[in-house]
Image (cartoon, grey):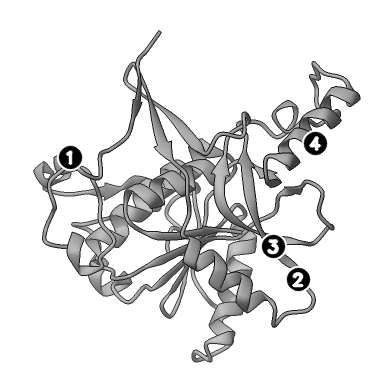
């Protein structure tokens, strides 16, 4: 069996470019120093082809969600809320040169699609964190906005995630690196969660709670659904499992929260999952 290790990389890699202690979003990969150019392949951006500090240096908030169309609509909404010139309808996709992700900028806010599932959002986050680093962005907050399946809550309730858990209700993310299983922390920014909960009380249409979010690798069997092409459990087994999840503090299920929490935690970025 491959060894299981706790990831303490936050303490065993050197600080880079004097960004770490100055509030900048930063990376944890000393190998990047050896590159003459860093190509953010899935964003169709690069350090040699684009002036990243000029394009993104003012970014303070990054909002991500699964659907390209939803993130475009969200960017237009933010554009109008900030009172920027025009109505935002002509906003352009910065990643138009690729069909992997879509990215829109509305003042200091980036709106990016991440696709579906852990692998897709993981690729996006790697390149996003490098983008923030190269652009020398300071004190960035990353917010994931999206749909999920609720457990024991009213439909339409917004779950503000305090910690992401796996299918065994453990607060961790398992990453296989080479032939080792590495365990990473999945706690999100607690102060940010409390702040968002406080703000939500001003909006009557969207009841909000703080709770655990369970991250699965599959939409159907992995989330206890009975309507997939395969199903290896009974309705009674499903209900018993979801009851145990609720008792463990889980209030919703989706497919990206664990790696999102782990990467934000490791890179020192304020992150929250909605």
Q: Which residue is mark 2?
A: 206
Quick one: label 2 or label 4, which is nearer the N terminus? 2
Residue depicted at x 74% and y 26%: 221
Residue 114 pos. (x, y %): 52, 50
Q: Which residue is mark 4?
A: 243
Quick one: label 3 or label 4, which is nearer the N terminus? 3
Residue depicted at x 72% and y 80%: 203
Could you tell me which secondary element the residue under label 2 belongs to?
A: loop
- Where is the N terminus found, in terms of image quarters? top left
Q: Is residue 195 above or below residue 35?
A: below
Q: Residues within 10 Å of mark 1 (few under 14, many from 20)?
A: few
Q: Residues within 10 Å of mark 2 (few under 14, many from 20)?
A: few
Quick one: label 1 or label 4, which is nearer the N terminus? 1
* Residues at marks 3 and 2, CA–CA distance in whole angstroms: 10 Å
* Residues at marks 2 and 1, CA–CA distance in whole angstroms: 43 Å
Q: Is residue 231 visible?
A: yes
- Where is the C terminus found, in terms of image quarters? bottom right
Q: Which residue is mark 3?
A: 209
- Location of residue 72 (image quadrant): bottom right
Tell which residue pokes out farthest to the top in this image: 1
* Residue nearest the viewer, comparing 73 with 156: 156
Q: Nearer the viewer, mark 2 or mark 1?
A: 1
Contact between marks 1 and 3 (CB within 8 A): the answer is no
52 relative to 79 in the view: left or right: left
Q: Which residue is mark 1?
A: 12
């Amino acid at each position: 069996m491959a060894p299981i290790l706790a990831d303490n990389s936050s303490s065993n890699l050197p600080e880079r470019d004097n960004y770490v202690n100055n509030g900048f979003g930063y990376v944890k990969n000393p190998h990047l120093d050896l590159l003459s150019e860093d190509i953010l392949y899935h964003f169709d951006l690069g350090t040699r082809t684009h002036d990243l500090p000029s394009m993104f240096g003012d970014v303070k908030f990054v909002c991500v969600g699964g659907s390209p169309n939803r993130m475009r609509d969200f960017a237009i909404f933010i554009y109008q809320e900030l009172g920027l010139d025009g109505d935002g309808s002509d906003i352009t996709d910065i990643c138009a040169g690729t069909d992997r992700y879509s990215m829109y900028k509305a003042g200091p806010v980036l709106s990016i699609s991440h696709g579906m599932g852990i692998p897709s959002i993981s690729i996006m986050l790697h390149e996003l964190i490098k983008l923030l680093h190269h652009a020398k962005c300071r004190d960035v907050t990353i917010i994931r906005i999206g749909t999920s399946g609720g457990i024991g809550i009213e439909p339409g309730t917004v779950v503000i995630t305090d910690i992401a858990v796996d299918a065994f209700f453990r607060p961790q993310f398992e990453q296989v690196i080479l032939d080792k299983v590495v365990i990473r922390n999945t706690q999100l920014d607690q102060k940010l969660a409390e702040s968002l909960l406080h703000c939500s009380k001003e909006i009557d249409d969207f009841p909000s709670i703080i709770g655990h979010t369970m991250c699965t690798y599959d939409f159907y069997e992995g989330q206890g659904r009975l309507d997939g092409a395969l199903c290896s459990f009974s309705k009674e087994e499903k209900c018993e499992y979801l009851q145990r999840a609720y008792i463990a503090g889980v209030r919703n299920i989706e497919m990206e929260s664990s790696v999102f929490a782990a990467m934000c935690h490791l890179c020192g970025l304020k992150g929250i999952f909605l």
